[in-house]
Amino acid sequence: MTPAVPDLSCRELVELVTDYLEASLPVDERTRFELHLTYCEFCRTYLAQMRQVLESAGELTEESLAPEARDALLATFRDWKKGSGGGS
């Protein structure tokens, strides 16, 4: 008889998704991760979205952004840094 694989919660899956996509999860964690995906449609959707984000981000260059979009992103990051206590 094989021991039962402990359930993985959705929250745990979200925390492990980067390691999963980088193929750096230990075998037991990867097994739990993939088992969870077999019965959780929400997490399958989340994983597909993360794969799409990574694929899209790999195609993004500074030159591909409209100047207005670049300025808006830079302003957002500056504001975020100030709000998080990271500013001077």
Image (tube, rainbow, N blue to C red):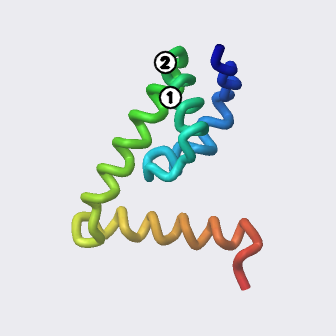
Label 1, secondary structure: give it. Answer: helix
Q: Position of residue 15 (x, y in %)?
A: 63, 44
Is 51 positioned to the left or the right of 17 in the image?
A: left
Q: Residue at the spot x=44%, y=49% of the render? A: 23
What residue is shown with label 1? Answer: 34
Snapshot quadrant of residue 61 = bottom left
80 versus 48 height, above or below: below
Residue type of the residue flagged with mark 2: Thr
Label 2, secondary structure: give it. Answer: helix
41 versus 68 height, above or below: above
Q: Nearer the viewer, residue 6 or 68?
A: 6
2 versus 57 height, above or below: above
Please tell me the numbered disc located at residue 38: 2
Q: Nearer the viewer, residue 28 or 74?
A: 28
Q: Residue at the spot x=52%, y=22% of the render? A: 42
Outermost residue toward the bottom in this view:
88
Snapshot quadrant of residue 36 = top right
Q: Residues within 10 Å of mark 1 (few under 14, many from 20)?
A: some
Is 63 positioned to the left or the right of 39 in the image?
A: left
CB under 8 Å between discs 2 and 1: yes
Q: The C terminus appears in which quarter of the rendering? A: bottom right
Q: Position of residue 27 (x, y in %)?
A: 54, 41
Snapshot quadrant of residue 29 = top right
Residue type of the residue flagged with mark 1: Glu
Please tell me the numbered disc located at residue 8: none
Q: How many marks?
A: 2
Q: Position of residue 75 (x, y in %)?
A: 51, 69
Q: Position of residue 8 (x, y in %)?
A: 66, 28
Q: Nearer the viewer, residue 28 or 2?
A: 2
58 versus 36 height, above or below: below
Q: Residue at the spot x=55%, y=68% of the render? A: 77
